[in-house]
Amino acid sequence: MEITVGIDVSKARLDVHVHPAGESFAVSNDEAGVAALVARLGRLEGVRGIGLEASGRYERLAVASLAEAGLPVMVLNPAQVRAYAHAIGQRAKTDPIDARLIARFIEAVRAEPRPLADAGTQELAALMARRRQLVGMLGAEKARYRQAAPGPVRLSLARMVTTLEDALKELDRDIDTTMRGTPVWRDKENLLASVPGIGKTIARTLLAELPELGRLNPKQVAALAGLAPFTRQSGKWRGRSFISGGRTAVRTALFMGALVASRHNPTLKAFHARLIANGKPKLVAIVAVARKLLTILNAIIREHKPWKPA
């Protein structure tokens, strides 16, 4: 008998449901509680999947501990779980109910665990996330500085801009050190950066936020990045395709790469020009370039061969 386990995550506790046994319990969301959870689930036989919804941070300790123990843990998209709840008419919402819903969702859709990012990749992802925060704050302060009238406020903004620029330089040095300390990352970064349009920052974002790169087929990796087109159709009516979901940081990085590649990458520049000549809107053409760029990068990592223009 296959067993699926749903875990509803909150700041203070973890509500757990074991399906189909119907067993429910809760533990504290701290080291002691998670250790007890790992020990209890480790004694079960036939566990096919243990699911937690992505909450941004509260699930991290449990996910890392369950993965380290070799248990089949998976981080689920909350929107998919909620859509499943609507599909089966589940309107009531409490933590124990949500845990049971997650366990049933894993069973119903036959969700499969995917390899989770290792500690090194998680550290790089945290560094790159912090870099995006600093870049955002720096851009905002520079905009305020340009609009401020001469005086104390402008001086304060100038000092803050200098502080943020120094912090960004220091963080970039830390990221460089991290990359140099991992030969595999250095090698992959060089492979990715061999493609015109892909700089150091985009390459590192992909390594940190898309560790599956090179291990999935083009459709799967496009879906993870939020670049897979979804078609709306009913009878003879056919709406425009659109993209949604996926990993925002990855999609943003690829979009910026596509803007550069559509001007400076001979292959993708010709592809972009052909789409525009065929009447595609500019935004649609750039999204298509980003998707094609991702397909190229996925193949480069899979084949371990640098970019060669067609």
Image (cartoon, helix red, strand yellow):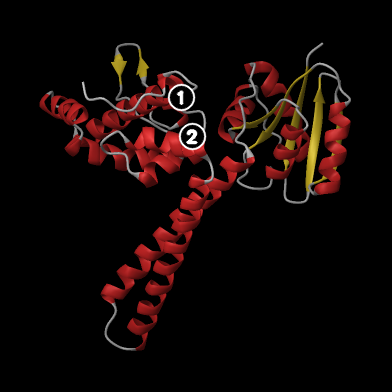
Q: Residue at (62%, 37%) from the top-left corner?
A: 118
Residue matched to label 2 = 210
Can you see residue 176?
yes
Q: Which mark is residue 303?
A: none
Name the element at disc 1: loop
Quarter of the figure with residue 78: top right
Left or right of residue 191: residue 183: right
Q: How many marks?
A: 2
Residue type marked 1: Gly
Quadrant in which the N terminus appears: top right
Quadrant in which the C terminus appears: top left
How far from the left and from the top, in percent, is residue 88? Answer: 65, 22
How far from the left and from the top, in percent, is residue 112? Answer: 63, 20
Residue type marked 2: Leu
Q: Residue at (24%, 40%) from the top-left corner?
A: 259
How far from the left and from the top, in percent, is residue 243? Answer: 37, 30
Work out whether residue 47 or residue 304 is closer to the camera in this orientation and state it.
Answer: 304
Residue matched to label 1 = 214
Q: Residue lying at the far left in this picture: please name it.
A: 277
